Structure formats: C-alpha cells, structure tokens
Image (spheres, grey):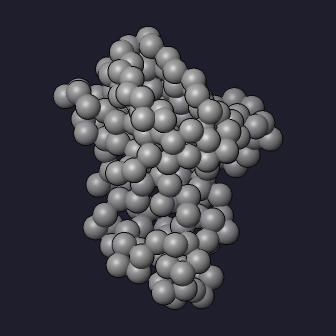
Amino acid sequence: MSIGKKISELRLKKKLTLRHLSKVSGCSLGFLSQVERDLVSPTVSSLKKIADALEVNMMYFFENPNKNQRIVVKKNERNRMVNPKSKVIYELLRPQFSDTELQALYMILEPGAFSGKDAHSHNGEEFVVVMKGRLEITVEGEHFVLDEGDSAVYKSTQPHSWRNGHNGITEALWVNYPPSF
C-alpha cells in the first residue's frame, strides 16, 4: 500500500478532515491532497509532520512490519519505506519495536535524490557512511562530497541537507540518535 493511501486511510479512521490535518501538521491543504493521491512524494520532514499530526510513529508508513522483531533484523525482512514517485528507499536496520535509542537506516538513493529544498535541523546527531556511489552533504552551509567508504558525523541541530548529485545509485548507512522517525 502506498504512503498516500496509508495517510488517507488513517486520517479517515481518525475522522479527521484534510483541512484539520493541514492545520495540525502545518502542511498545505493542496500538498496533503496531492500526497494522499500519490501525485507528489512527501519529504522525510513533511512525512514526520504528518505522522506527528496523526499521532503515529513514522514507522507506521513502512511496509510489512514484523511485530516480533526486537533485536535482529534479517536482510530480507527489513521494513522499507517506498514511495513510487520518491527517489529514495529507506530500509530500517533497527527493529521496529526495539527499545534502543539508535536509528540505523540503509538508504538507496537514485540519481537526483535529495533531502528537501531547504536545509533542516532537529535534535540529536547523525552518522553516515557511503557504501556505494557518491553523496553530497551540506552542514551549516559547508559542502562536502563523500565517496564510497567515506563517512561524516555531525550534530543534527546544525542546518543540514544531502543529495545524490552523481548519475548512479548511491547506497548509504545512516545512523541517527535519537531516532528521527
């Protein structure tokens, strides 16, 4: 099931209008309408706002959760967040119902994938290792290019953004503390 359909079903289950979700999430009415119809893909930050407004963890939008996961995540059982129009696949490496305070993601970035138009910030720290390809990150206005095997760590309170600016797939291991979704 698509992210848009999951948002729509949850919103209706909670008996919320699109207008009310817009007000609570801070996302525009038109944007939410397009997301629910899978015409546009939400960024991670807008999906977080929607999840918070609907009072669910962003993990709600991942496919096929295995509720028995507590410690180990098998490669073929990773929870994935995929949107047909998105250029990013997020695979959760942390068990969905784990009580740990780390969030590890395996991210597959198609050419042109990016974190959003604007830099963003939030509480915590981030660590990234490029497993394949090339990743461009910007932290507090300073631009860095990470090639395969390169890593970076920074405070998430610093305005930051990322993008895959090369013409191939980039794969990265991303660790957040505390979990961002």
Q: Nearer the viewer, residue 122 or 38?
A: 122
Asked if one can make out residue 75 in the rendered structure from this viewpoint, the answer is no
Question: Which residue is located at x 59 percent, y 77 percent?
Answer: 24
Whether residue 9 is situated above or below residue 49 in the rendered picture:
below
Camera-side residue of 30 and 39? 30
Q: Is residue 178 at least partly visible in the picture? A: yes
Q: Is residue 126 left or right of residue 47?
A: right
Q: Position of residue 143 (x, y in %)?
A: 38, 27
Q: Residue at x 61, y 41 (%)?
A: 157
Residue at 60%, 88% in the rendered image? 15
Q: Relative to 140, is 149 above or below?
A: above
Image quadrant for the N terminus? bottom left
Residue lying at 45% horizontally and 26% vertically, measured from the top left: 172
Q: Residue furthest left?
A: 167
Q: Left of 52 or right of it: where is 137? A: left
Residue 164 sits in which quadrant?
Answer: top left
